[in-house]
Amino acid sequence: MIAFSRPSFGGMELRYLEQAIRGGHVGGSGPFTERAETLLEQGHGTGRTLLTTSCTHALELAARLLDLRPGDEVIVPSYAFVTTASAFMLHGGTPVFVDVRNDTLNLDPALVESAITPRTRAICIVHYAGVGATPDTFRGIADRYGLLLIEDNAHSLYGAWRGKTLGTFGQLSTLSFHATKNITCGEGGALHINHPQFVERAEILRDKGTDKSRFVRGETSKYTWVDVGSSWSISDLLAGVLVGQLERFGEIHDRLHAIWNRYHQALSEWAVGGGVRPPVIPDGAKHTSHTYHLRFDSLQTRTRFLNHMRARDVTVVIHYQPLHVSAIGAKLGGRFGDCPVSEDAGDTLVRLPIYASLSDAELDHIIESVGSFAP
Ligand SMILES: *Cc1c(COP(=O)(O)O)cnc(C)c1O
């Protein structure tokens, strides 16, 4: 069976893990954490990066920085990961679900302005599949209404929009290093901060609400409880693995791009002939090849496709189910028909395997299997 996703580790990840164990600093805020944060800051070209235990926790840290009060609203796409919405809810906010565009499945700017109310505090965009969600447009809207822009950048490390790196448009952006992401340390994430006023408080919130970072830097003689935070620092063992992955970023990405381009070339004629929609990459987007997805005309056709691929030993998987009609979304008032594109994508989208260790023979077999399906 060809797996859907598989991490790609080289030699250095193991070496750095061993070095972290032998070095003795295995808790948070160690030397590998510092190295990974520096590499990510250099990669973004601006701002401060704080490694966290996950992207979910980075989103929670962002939510805490907003100091949400009951009734405060955060606009999120309905077609998104659960914690893109729940992180804000867990820290006092109410997610407001807005539909996505039919081409890129990114939040639709044309629908966002009418969702803004006097209680709106922030807009959180997802660069779905690593394709920029017109972040310049959203930054303009957010600035006009005095809102914060947050980028859930879990799919899109070092992608760009109109020449500017994704993750640098919002005041805050988040990354995931979960096992299924382009580079991984198993479980991990980061908060990237482009707004200097948030840096010191974010360090405090990540470190149990204490000013321990100042103590470690020798700026204070003792550390104490100064804010209501949590334990969101990553172990230096995992940060070591992450440094190894960051150093191999170019190699991993070249392979992901080659696979993505091969799918796109080999399947385009088949897709057009069968009414299947391949991914759309708009002008201005430098995408990250995080996902290669296809959309069929109906749930029935997709189910036939899933069975067809399973019979040929290829794991293909569906993606998000629209959040506004989930059990929690419905409690918040979401109804079928509110976000028709998200609902359609939930029924019709399938993702093909894409990871650096996918072999050419496996790729050939997947393409041949897809091409033999009659939509
Ligand atoms: C994976 C993912 C997350 C959550 O990442 P974790 O590191 O597993 O918490 C959040 N948002 C998006 C868009 C994701 O793809």
Image (cartoon, rainbow, N blue to C red):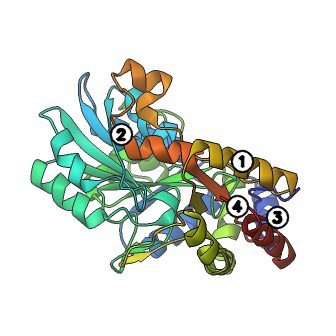
Q: Give the residue pinned by disc 2.
A: 339
Quarter placement of the N terminus: bottom right
199 lies left or right of 145: right
Q: Between residues 135 and 246, which one lies in front from this camera angle?
A: 135
Let me know if residue 120 appears in the view: yes
N-terminal-most mark, 4 or 2: 2
Quote the CA–CA distance across marks 3 and 4: 45 Å
Closest to the observer: 201 or 354?
Answer: 354
Q: What residue type is labelled 3?
A: Leu
* In this picture, residue 236 sits left or right of residue 72: right
Cβ of mark 4 under 8 Å from ligand 1: the answer is no
Q: Do residues under tags 1 and 4 come within 8 Å of each other at their CB atoms?
A: no
The residue lying at 64 percent from left, 62 percent from top is 32
User: Where residue 304 is drawn, which disc sits there?
Assistant: 1
Determine the secondary structure under disc 3.
helix
- Residue on which the image places disc 4: 374
The amino acid type, in three-letter code, at marker 2 is Cys
Tell me which amino acid carries mark 4: Ala
The x and y percentages for residue 86 are: 45, 32
Numbered disc total: 4
Viewer-side residue, 289 vs 371: 371
Secondary structure beneath label 1:
helix
Q: Is residue 120 left or right of residue 344?
A: left
Identify the amino acid type marked 1: Arg
Q: Is residue 160 above or below residue 354?
A: below
- At a point 50% along the width and 64% down the height, the residue shown is 130
User: Which mark is first along the chain, 4 or 1?
Assistant: 1
**Which type of secondary structure does the marked residue at label 2 adopt?**
loop
